[in-house]
Amino acid sequence: MSAVVVVGSFNVDHVWRCDALPAPGATIAGQYHTGPGGKGFNQAIAAARGGAATTFLCALGEDAGGAMARELARQDGLTLNAEASDQPTGTGGIYVDSRGRNTIVIGAGANAALSVGFIEAQHALLASASVLLAQLESPMDTVEAALASARNAGVTTVLNAAPANAPTSISLLKLADILTPNETEFASLLARHVGERLEPDDVAATDGSTLHQLCRQLLPAGTVVITLGAVGAFVSHAEDQLRGDTQPYYRIAAEQAQTIDTTGAGDAFNGALVASLAHAPSAAFAQHVRFANRFAARSTEAEGAAASMPRLTPEG
Ligand code: ATP
């Protein structure tokens, strides 16, 4: 039995560090490295390193990228159930300039072929989990099927509504018990589903009561956790579902960190949050957010995404 099931993407990231981002038609030199990526895989590794028995459901090609995913999952004690695809394993082509700015091309490949049928065949696994975590780098109907299957079995559902430009529907959002956007994703969900404009840079400074009202309009019956980077996180609960907290909304400051690379901090937060929820389902929700903040802060102290996830459990 897995306490946590993560449904999502795996990519092989190809990264070039260059002085400047290449202009159209240019050929430039850069320092190359490759490694695992994809929000689903990063979050699954975080949940596993956060101490949860974790299964990752994804789609992989029959290629070196697929073999890499299986080997890395094995090394981390992560159970990997992959739908075999005739598409290549997902890839990311990433240029990073000397100021840390990047340009990214994603080849979704097998990730775009993760099917509803495959997820439906995993119903017994989903129904036996404590928590299901999904993101939006997989087909929307597949994500919706996973959330619905878990929800119908009484499993806590967490949706990290990332990336910000992924299409979403109200019916999809309503399947989430807990929604975890960052500031950009929150602003884009508000614009799309509530008809409110809020600049991502203004989210952290918006007063709590206003943010709470906006969260209630976005997800009336669930909990919204907005991650605020180095500021921490904002939590908003439905008034009749406080999840062990005493306040319907509050902020929790980020943990101090010797930050060198924030790539994957959001993935670290999400994986740690579900690991903590699975570990102590009836604990006050603020306790889970504190652990997620601590875990994510540690992840910023090393380079990379999956590789930078700390081994840190809710027990300490
Ligand atoms: P990314 O896209 O870089 O993976 P994100 O935009 O999805 O991240 P953020 O809101 O930037 O997510 O960060 C997620 C969490 O990571 C924050 O809520 C916080 O707990 C932690 N965090 C991020 N940056 C820092 C930092 N500089 N110091 C301490 N904690 C941080």
Image (tube, rainbow, N blue to C red):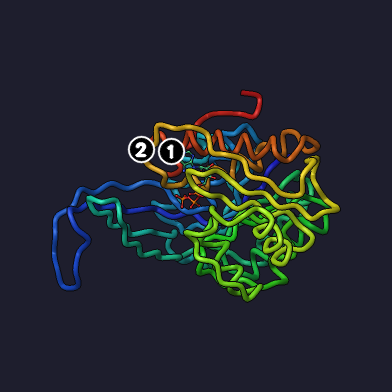
Q: In this view, does 300 lie to the left or right of 55?
A: left
Which residue corresponds to the image point at 80% horizontal and 41% vertical from the top-left? 246
Relative vertical location of residue 262 with respect to residue 89 in this rendering, above or below: above
Binning the other alpha carbons within 10 Å of mark 2 as few (below 14), some (14 to 19) or many (20 upward) gives few
Kindly identify which residue carries mark 2.
Answer: 260
Kindly identify which residue carries mark 1.
Answer: 300
Q: Does mark 2's beta carbon lie closer than 8 Å to ligand 1?
A: no
Q: Position of residue 31 (x, y in %)?
A: 20, 48
- What is the number of the mark on residue 109? none
Q: Where is residue 60 in the image (x, y as percent from the top left)?
A: 50, 57
Q: Which of 63 and 281 is in front in this view?
A: 281
| Quarter of the image where the N terminus is located | top right
Q: Where is residue 42 in the image (x, y as percent from the top left)?
A: 50, 46
Taking the view exactly as shown, the residue that stands out farthest to the top is 316
* Residue kind at label 1, given as amino acid type: Thr
Secondary structure, mark 1, is: loop
Q: Is residue 146 left or right of residue 299?
A: right
Which residue corresponds to the image point at 63% horizontal and 35% vertical from the top-left? 290
Query: Does the CB distance between marks 1 and 2 fall below 8 Å?
Result: yes
Q: Nearer the viewer, residue 97 or 64?
A: 97
Binning the other alpha carbons within 10 Å of mark 1 as few (below 14), some (14 to 19) or many (20 upward) gives many
- Quarter occupied by residue 192: bottom right
Q: Where is residue 15 in the image (x, y as percent from the top left)?
A: 30, 52
Q: Nearer the viewer, residue 51 or 110?
A: 51
Q: Does mark 1's beta carbon lie closer than 8 Å to ligand 1?
A: yes
Secondary structure, mark 2, is: loop
Q: In this view, does 173 lie to the left or right of 83?
A: right
Q: Is residue 247 left or right of residue 259?
A: right
